[in-house]
Amino acid sequence: DTEVTQTPKHLVMGMTNKKSLKCEQHMGHRAMYWYKQKAKKPPELMFVYSYEKLSINESVPSRFSPECPNSSLLNLHLHALQPEDSALYLCASSQTMDLQLVGYTFGSGTRLTVV
Amino acid sequence: AQKVTQAQTEISVVEKEDVTLDCVYETRDTTYYLFWYKQPPSGELVFLIRRNSFDEQNEISGRYSWNFQKSTSSFNFTITASQVVDSAVYFCALSEARDSNYQLIWGAGTKLIIKP
C-alpha cells in the first residue's frame, strides 16, 4: 500500500458545526503532515507529527485541532470555522521528518467549504 | 532567505509541443534538495523528482527531463511531446533545514494547459 487516504473528499459545514478530517497511511511512515491550500496558491504547512507527537504547529488558529491516535492515522478536528477557512486540506506522510531521505506522499485532499 | 520563484504563472501549448517550466531558487545552504510536484485537477500532489545539491546530472524519465544548473540556481523541467494528460499545476520546491527538521519552500506554481 503506497497511498495516503483522506476522507471525506468533500465537506460542506456551517460556522457552528464540528467536523473532522481523517487521514490514513499504511506505509510505516512516522511523520505526518497537514497542509492547507487555497485556490491558485501553493500548499501551506499547518501541523507536523513525528512519531505520533506534535512537532510543528505553524501558528494555526485553535479552531483547527490535530490529533494523531496512532502511527497510521491523523485527524484534523474543525470547530467554529470561518468562510475564509474554505480550502483544500492535504495530508502527507514521509518515512521521517528528514526530507533528505524521501519525499512526501500526499493524499488527494478534502475540499472544505464553510458556509 | 530561502525562496523559490516560478515566474510563469500559466503556459498554454498545443499537444505534441515541447514545453519548459522554469524554477529559480535562492538558498544559503550548501546542502539542499529540490523537488517537482504535479497537481492535476483532482487535487492530489504527485511527486515527480527529488534532486540533491551535489548531483548536477540532468535526469530523464520518459517524456520528462530536468536540467539542474547550480551556477544559475535553476532547476527547470521540460516535457517533450506534451499530452493533454500533462495539464496540471506544477510546483517546484526547495527543502529548508530548520531546527534539525526539513520543510519545503514552495514556488507559486505554473499552470500548464495542453490543448488537443
Image (cartoon, rainbow, N blue to C red):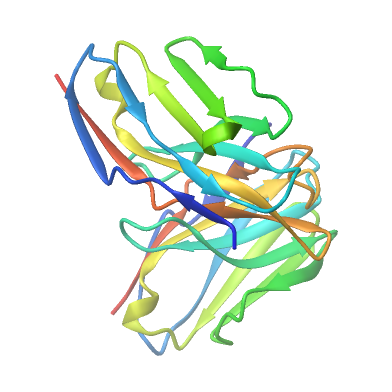
Q: Nearer the viewer, residue B29 or B62?
A: B29
Q: Nearer the viewer, residue B116 or A16?
A: B116
The answer to which image quadrant residue A63 occupies is: bottom right
Tell me if residue A4 comes above or below residue B22 in the rendering: below
Q: Quadrant of the N terminus of chain A?
A: top right
Tell me if residue B47 comes above or below residue A69 in the rendering: above
Q: Quadrant of the C terminus of chain A?
A: bottom left
Q: Going by the image, does B32 lie left or right of B72?
A: right
Q: Nearer the viewer, residue B92 or A115?
A: B92
Q: Going by the image, does B82 lie left or right of A35?
A: left
Q: How many marks?
A: 0
Across and down, in percent, residue B33 comes to 67, 40
Residue at 34% over, 79% down: A84
Residue B47 seen by the camera? no
Residue A22 seen by the camera? yes
Tell me if residue A11 comes above or below residue A80 in the rendering: above
Q: Going by the image, does B87 lie left or right of A56?
A: left
The answer to which image quadrant residue A53 occupies is: bottom right
Tell me if residue B69 comes above or below residue A33 in the rendering: above
Residue at 20% over, 16% down: B15
Across and down, in percent, residue B26 comes to 56, 51
Residue at 75% over, 52% down: A72
